[in-house]
């Protein structure tokens, strides 16, 4: 892994190639294919002095870091990273991030680059409760970016306060709202951040909660025409996706949260026509699936279902679950359980493998379990 990192990493990022990340099993191709390595191998590379030196040289190259940011904002890249995490890579990815942050030079470069706006907008889309909330959030971000582009020297557009009632209502109350501002280039003063942490600690000791109100300021580099134009394009895309999701939700009587996630789900499916056809059939024709999404347990069930749909393995599992009569190359993984003994036997047989269960209705007592 370290040899491939040293020999290929900067060239792949700068030359428009790709970097493939995988878990212990499937390979996830990023930006057209390229270098492949597993999270386990990447963790080992973090302990390789030569590989770390190559990464340091990469972070000191503005052109290469611009490519890194573009890759992070690429929808296909984000969809595949999400799929990798949903397939069990969250803990390993967190450990890699911790190892990077523990290196002062690398951690500083990563912090200076800031979060991906594409990823922040993905989080914002998932956290908005409906189409109107997402429309308001995207409109607020577009207004900020366009004002900066049209009046770059006006001080009033270069700073904002997160405690503003209007900004909080439209944007910062949502997960991903503050992160989107940071990704655009709005940053808080470090001394104010430390003071806020102190106030939070005091409020926590007293049993209260410190109200979030920071002054954020955008730097000169982030106010460049190219950076603002790219930010506007990403936000406008998120807004269009929200509007399209609203139309789909209304037309097909589906939850907005599911419809707004469809672009990333389709990116994971890629060119697999069988999976694409199965998803369409599931969404539009499977009465049981649609009843789960609209029934009393929908609020609890939907986040788990969306988590599964964001990876090919998860989507196949959902299709098997809601079409248990259809045989697959792996055989039948869905079993009916209706007694405590059957439940216990199914759990024991699953071992360490994940389980998905759907409780039966009053008029249909048996339950099903996907192993």
Image (cartoon, grey):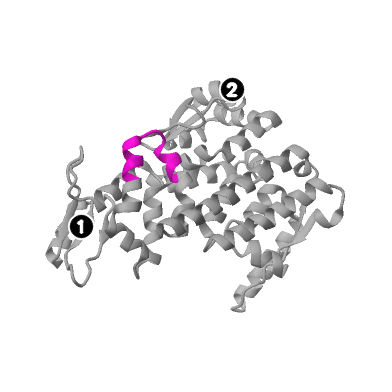
Residue denoted by label 2: 11
Instruction: Check if residue 59 falls in the magenta segment.
Output: no
Viewer-nearest residue: 201 or 313: 313
Q: Secondary structure at mark 2?
A: helix
In the image: residue 167, left or right of residue 85: right
In three-dimensional space, the C-alpha distance between marks 2 and 1, rounded to whole angstroms, equals 48 Å
Viewer-nearest residue: 187 or 135: 135
* Residue 97 in sight in this render: yes
Q: Residue at x 20, y 48 (%)?
A: 333
Residue 359 image offset from top left, x and y in percent: 24, 65
Residue denoted by label 1: 347
Residue 121 image offset from top left, x and y in percent: 58, 50
Q: Are marks 2 and 1 in contact (CB under 8 Å)?
A: no
Image label count: 2
From what the image shows, is residue 272 above or below residue 291? above
Viewer-nearest residue: 242 or 58: 242
Residue 134, numbered label: none
In the image: residue 205, left or right of residue 250: right
From what the image shows, is residue 16 above or below residue 261? above
**How dense is the environment of label 2, judged by Cα within 10 Å: few (below 14), some, or many (20 and up)?**
some
From what the image shows, is residue 368 above or below residue 9? below
Q: Which residues are magenta?
A: 265-279
Please report whichever mark, 2 or 1, sits nearer to the chain's N-terminal start.
2
């Amino acid at each position: 892994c370290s040899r491939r990192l040293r020999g290929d990493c900067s060239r792949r990022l700068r030359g428009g190639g790709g970097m493939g990340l995988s878990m212990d099993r499937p390979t996830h191709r990023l930006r057209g294919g390229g270098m492949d390595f597993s999270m386990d191998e990447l963790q080992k590379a973090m302990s390789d002095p030569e590989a770390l030196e190559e990464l340091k040289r990469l972070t000191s190259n503005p052109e290469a870091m611009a490519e890194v940011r573009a890759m992070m904002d690429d929808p296909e890249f984000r969809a595949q990273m999400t799929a990798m995490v949903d397939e069990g890579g969250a803990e390993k990815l967190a450990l890699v991030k911790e190892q990077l942050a523990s290196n002062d030079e690398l951690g500083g470069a990563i912090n200076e680059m800031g979060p991906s706006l594409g990823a922040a907008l993905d989080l914002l889309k998932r956290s908005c409760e409906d189409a109107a909330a997402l429309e308001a959030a995207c409109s607020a971000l577009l207004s900020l970016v366009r004002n900066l582009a049209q009046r770059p020297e006006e001080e009033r557009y270069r700073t904002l306060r997160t405690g503003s009632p209007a900004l909080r209502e439209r944007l910062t109350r949502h997960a991903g709202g503050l992160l989107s501002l940071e990704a655009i280039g709005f940053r808080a003063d470090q001394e104010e951040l430390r003071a806020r942490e102190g106030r939070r600690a005091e409020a926590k000791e007293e049993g209260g909660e410190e109200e979030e109100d920071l002054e954020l300021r955008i730097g000169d580099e982030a106010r460049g025409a190219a950076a603002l134009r790219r930010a506007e394009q990403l936000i406008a895309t998120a807004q269009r996706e929200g509007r399209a999701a609203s139309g789909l939700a209304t037309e097909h009587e589906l939850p907005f949260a599911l419809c707004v996630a469809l672009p990333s789900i389709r990116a994971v499916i890629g060119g697999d026509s069988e999976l694409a056809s199965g998803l369409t059939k599931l969404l539009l024709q499977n009465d049981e699936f649609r009843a789960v999404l609209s029934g009393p347990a929908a609020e609890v069930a939907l986040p788990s279902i969306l988590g599964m749909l964001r990876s090919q393995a998860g989507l196949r599992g959902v299709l098997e679950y809601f079409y248990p009569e259809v045989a697959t190359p792996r055989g039948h993984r869905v079993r009916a359980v209706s007694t405590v003994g059957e439940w216990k036997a199914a759990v024991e047989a699953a071992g360490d493998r994940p389980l998905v269960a759907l409780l039966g209705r009053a008029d249909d007592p048996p339950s099903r379990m996907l192993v």
